[in-house]
């Protein structure tokens, strides 16, 4: 049983990322953190690990079609807008349980200013909240843009995470998985105890 449990744990850990399925989404927010629902304000994509197995830096990458006339994210040179995004794994639907990290919001005007220094590129930071001291261990994110019909559109996002941080994140996932397995057992123990007490009370009444 212990060996079976260990194998299941290693499967959840997926040390070599053999079953990794990642996703990301990015959106434009206003100064109050409210998302807009008009064209050019949000985009999502699958995420691939492009670094070699065992590399010191784990590199995640997502690409977006800048020629898509409807589904794209425009980086606007307007003061009130921010860029925000999230990375997650395991399924196309985002949740707190499967989130890898989220982008620290960046002013879109600052993105444009960076792009003037390094053409079609700017950088940001993302936080993996389950890491110990996560606010001092922000993860690097780099963005590539393309200009299409007088609009600056997001074309590629690269997230670079130290392997030690990635393994710590996955270890946390294993703990969550274990905790999820323990709760049904805890409830069962309580039910068994309750049943025993009820049977004991019934016997006492008969006497």
Image (cartoon, rainbow, N blue to C red):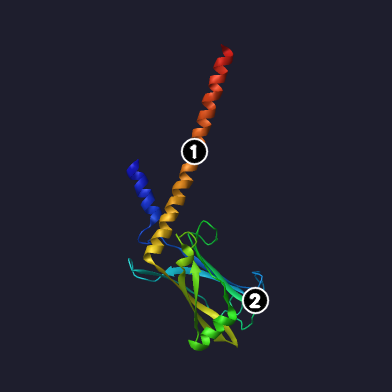
Residue of label 1? 186
Give the residue displayed 38% in from the left and 50% down from the top. Answer: 9
The answer to which quarter of the image holds residue 168 is bottom left
Task: Give the left or right position of residue 123, taking residue 205 as reference.
Answer: left
Is label 1 in a helix, a strand or a loop? helix
Give the residue displayed 50% in from the left and 69% down from the top. Answer: 126
Q: Residue 41 location in percent, x, y?
A: 62, 75
The correct choice, above or below, for 97 with respect to 194 in the image is below
Mark 1 or mark 2, which has the lower sequence index? 2
Q: Residue 121 location in percent, x, y?
A: 49, 82
Residue of label 2? 39
Q: Is residue 74 visible?
A: no
The correct choice, above or below, for 144 with respect to 169 in the image is below
Badge 2, how many Cα within 10 Å: few under 14, some, many 20+? few
The correct choice, above or below, for 138 with respect to 175 in the image is below
Q: CA distance from mark 1 to mark 2?
A: 49 Å
Q: Nearer the viewer, residue 79 or 14?
A: 79
Q: Nearer the viewer, residue 22 or 81?
A: 81
Give the residue displayed 57% in from the left and 86% down from the top. Answer: 148
Q: Nearer the viewer, residue 90 or 55?
A: 55
Q: Residue 200 location in percent, x, y?
A: 53, 20
Q: Nearer the viewer, residue 145 or 68?
A: 145
Q: Tag on residue 150? A: none
The answer to which quarter of the image holds residue 160 is bottom left
> In this rendering, which labeled residue sits more in front, label 1 or label 2?
1
The correct choice, above or below, for 3 with respect to 117 in the image is above
Give the residue displayed 42% in from the left and 62% down from the top. Answer: 20
Quadrant assignment for the C terminus: top right
Q: Is residue 205 visible?
A: yes
Q: Residue 11 location in percent, x, y?
A: 38, 53
Quadrant assignment for the N terminus: top left
Task: Give the left or right position of residue 131, taking residue 37 as reference.
Answer: left
């Amino acid at each position: 049983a212990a060996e079976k449990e260990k194998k299941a744990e290693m499967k959840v850990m997926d040390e070599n990322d053999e079953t990794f399925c990642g996703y990301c989404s990015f959106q434009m927010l206003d100064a109050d953190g409210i998302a807009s629902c008009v064209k050019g304000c949000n985009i999502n994509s699958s995420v691939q690990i492009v670094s070699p197995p065992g590399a010191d830096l784990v590199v995640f990458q997502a690409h977006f079609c800048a020629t898509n006339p409807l589904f794209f994210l425009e980086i606007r040179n307007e003061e009130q807008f921010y860029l925000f995004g999230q990375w997650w794994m395991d399924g196309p639907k985002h949740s707190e349980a499967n989130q890898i990290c989220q982008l620290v919001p960046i002013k879109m005007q600052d993105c444009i200013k960076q792009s003037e220094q390094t053409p079609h590129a700017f950088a940001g930071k993302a936080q993996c909240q389950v890491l110990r001291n996560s606010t001092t261990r922000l993860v690097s994110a780099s963005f590539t843009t393309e200009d299409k019909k007088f609009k600056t559109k997001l074309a590629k996002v690269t997230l670079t995470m130290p392997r030690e941080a990635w393994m710590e994140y996955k270890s946390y996932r294993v703990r969550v998985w274990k905790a999820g397995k323990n709760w049904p057992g805890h409830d069962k123990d309580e039910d068994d105890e309750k049943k025993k007490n009820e049977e004991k009370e019934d016997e006492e009444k008969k006497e």
